[in-house]
Amino acid sequence: MGNIAKDINSTFPSEQVKALINIRYTANYLEHIGQTVLKPYNISEQQYNILRILKGAGKEMMVNTVRDRMVQKSPNITRLMDKMCDKKIIERTRCESDRRVVFVKITEKGLQLLERIDMRQIEKKINPLEEKEYLQLNRLLEYKMK
């Protein structure tokens, strides 16, 4: 990655269009790196995200709450969690008072899996910015995406 126009052999009608395409292109690049890092552990980025959410919560959570907190929203979170239950990295239980409500929690095996995954490998694949550049980038992305 470097110059988006050269990388995709294209020109852009405006800097705004170039920026939007550059954001998508960069997101796809980062997603590919994430998939490469997680492949040996046989989990997807979405499954990794679910594990991180559950670890951070420190207790069981409703499936809908997990869905709301995900970075990459999944229309089929049930299928994702089915696979995770099969791998025994999360557990699901139904609420006693309302059978429609399902709770999930990370298992010891899931915690151990998270400990083995070194996501710093992603940092090694991208050109580092200075702290002030990261602050500026975050401000721009957060402000304009409201």
Image (tube, rainbow, N blue to C red):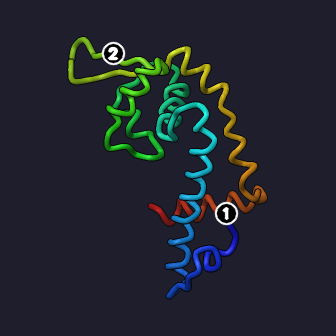
Q: Secondary structure at mark 1?
A: helix
Q: Residue 138's spot in the image, x, y percent?
A: 61, 58
Placement of 140 over or under 61, stated as above or below? below
Badge 2 amino acid:
Thr
Q: Residue 90's spot in the image, x, y percent?
A: 45, 21
Image point (41%, 21%), residue name: 85
Image point (59%, 62%), residue name: 26
Q: Residue 142's spot in the image, x, y percent?
A: 53, 59
Which quadrant would residue 130 be assigned to in this image?
bottom right
Residue 136 is tagged as: 1
Name which of mark 1 and mark 2 comes first in the sequence: 2
Placement of 21 over or under 42, stated as above or below? below
Q: Residue 33's spot in the image, x, y percent?
A: 62, 50
Badge 1 amino acid:
Gln
Pointer 1: residues within 10 angstroms few (<14), some, or many (20+)?
Answer: few
Q: Is residue 25 left or right of residue 76?
A: right
Placement of 31 over or under 69, stated as above or below? below
Rendered-image quadrant of the N terminus: bottom right
- Where is mark 2, residue-wise? 93
Pointer 2: residues within 10 angstroms few (<14), some, or many (20+)?
Answer: some
